[in-house]
Image (spheres, rainbow, N blue to C red):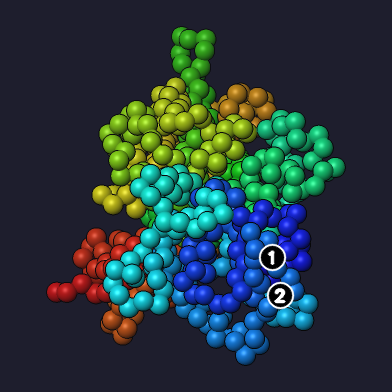
Amino acid sequence: MIPLKLETLLDGRVVEQDRVEYKRGWNPTDTIHAICAYANDFPNMNGGYIVIGIEAENGRPLLPPFGVEEADLDHIQNELFQYCNLIEPRYLPQLEIVEYKGKQLIYLWCSAGDAGPYSAPLDILSKNKEERRKEYWIKPFSVKTIANQSEKFELFNKFNSVPFDDRVNRKAKIGDIQLGHIRDFLVESNSALAVDVYSRAIEDTLVSLEVANATDVGVDIRNIALLMFCDYPEKFMPCAQIELAWFNTPEEEGTDVFEEKTFTGPLFRQVKDALDYIKNQVIVEKVVKVPGRAEADRFFNFPYEAIEEALANACQHKSYQIAEPVEIRIYLNRIMIINYPGPEPWIDMDEFREGKAVSRRYRNRRIGEFFKEIDLAEKKSTGITKILRTLATNGSPLPTFKTDAERHSLETTIWIHEGFKVNDVSSRGQEIGGTVDVLNVPNYDPKNGVGDKSAIIGDKSAITSDKQAIKASDREQAIVDYLRANNEARNAEIAELLGLRPSRARDVLKSMSEKGIIEKCGDRKNTYYRLAET
């Protein structure tokens, strides 16, 4: 249902008349041009409305309406949706059949599009190739027109300059936003808006935060609002979550004993919860007494600030249009953080590894802004520098940044400090040997040295995943048997076959592909696997 009632539209006090087109009858070409122009939203007024069945004079509706014959309603709707397929990229307005003063009207709401710019043929019905040429239609004032060269440039710049996190999500409703999450963020960021967050309308707060657009009948919710203030952002952006796997044996992915944890909810809360988990369960400080010196050497297995920056970077630079989570993998000797895709193609990876790369465009600029407000991220293009600086201060090895030629993903690996031998730490970080003295460090906090924590983490046994229906040693043979029977398989099928998460199944398939047992086929969205030819 279109939120703005037709009666309110006709009244003319809420919506400017140049945002409304009235049409006495069904004119396919003129209607498609209007839809295309409103979708392009050249004047940034959030689209417009079309009413079929009412004539206009000087932009004002002439009443009573002519109406649309009831017998024509179905075929007009069918033709409308058929002709909308000629708009490139495809765009569909919201449609409603409304009875007004005893007449049937076709009421269309054409909200500003997110995937443009949009083009449509000069003449929808013509079979002449020249007349079927597609043009970019705009409506800068009250008249539709074809965009000239400078206007085209402005259109492309308009759509290309809006990152995904700042685009309107047409599926979202105000009920998807939780006021409690807004308040938590405002308090953490010490915002002046926190004082009266419960006394003002939630819509006003969202507009003030620039995470929603005011419209004629409420607000349009942007993706950033869903990512930051929604209980389940993954409902709108699949895999908008953090997945952690802890492999606490030398066999790593080959073991049946590991721990998995998924962090969901508002993105800033996901990051903080994941960091709290790593801080409390993984990070250990060693205090080494040095003979002949009053001061002891202190260092961490993994410095907290480096992990914090790497995880915040991964969440900020992940594409939320790709259904892959941010992954954290904890091994005996390293922590790996993976985001999809990797750095943009124009970024030089050598400069990136040295912290010298400067991005020309940010994949999710609003996430970065929000993270900086609560000290989860550094200022622009300084995150890698902070990681390098923190590791150097701790005496840790240099990190590893790995991607492929197509930049499908980025693997950021923080290596364990050389003062921690792999066999020095047992399950869940309990110290089991070595020649160094490890002391309890009171008032510990990994960021600034305050807060209560012991340098030795208590032992908690790793759990065995109940999802593993097939033992690690039998997985490759199970996949081979499946491919022999079915010729090919996708990652999701193998995950179900093995009883693994998709990310774990992908690791198994990658290993088999590297061994030459199977081969990977298709592109990113249509990847499948088959037995390698022998």
* Rendering coords of residue 120 (x, y %): 41, 65
Q: Amino acid at mark 2?
A: Pro
Relative to 334, does residue 92 appear above or below in the rendering?
below
Work out which residue is located at the far right of the displayed protein and give it.
199
Q: Is residue 274 visible?
A: no
Q: Are marks 2 and 1 in contact (CB under 8 Å)?
A: yes
Q: Which residue is mark 2?
A: 65
Residue at image point 73% right, 81% down: 103
Q: Secondary structure at mark 1?
A: strand
Can residue 211 be seen? yes
Which image quadrant for residue 9? bottom right
Q: In which quarter of the view is residue 77 placed?
A: bottom right
Give the class, few, some or many, for how many residues have Cα within 10 Å of label 2's Cα (few <14, many ≥20): some
Q: Quadrant of the N terminus?
A: bottom right
Is 104 rendered above or below residue 454?
below
Left of 527 or right of it: where is 188? right
- Where residue 352 appears, as percent x and y from the top left, is 33, 34
- For the residue pair 307 and 224, the one nearer the viewer reads as 224
The disc placed on residue 49 is none
Residue 457 picture location, percent across and down: 59, 39
Taking the spot 61% from the left edge, 23% from the top edge, the residue there is: 449
Please identify the quarter of the rendering in which residue 372 is found. top right
Q: Which mark is residue 61?
A: 1
Residue 258 in percent (x, y) is at 49, 57
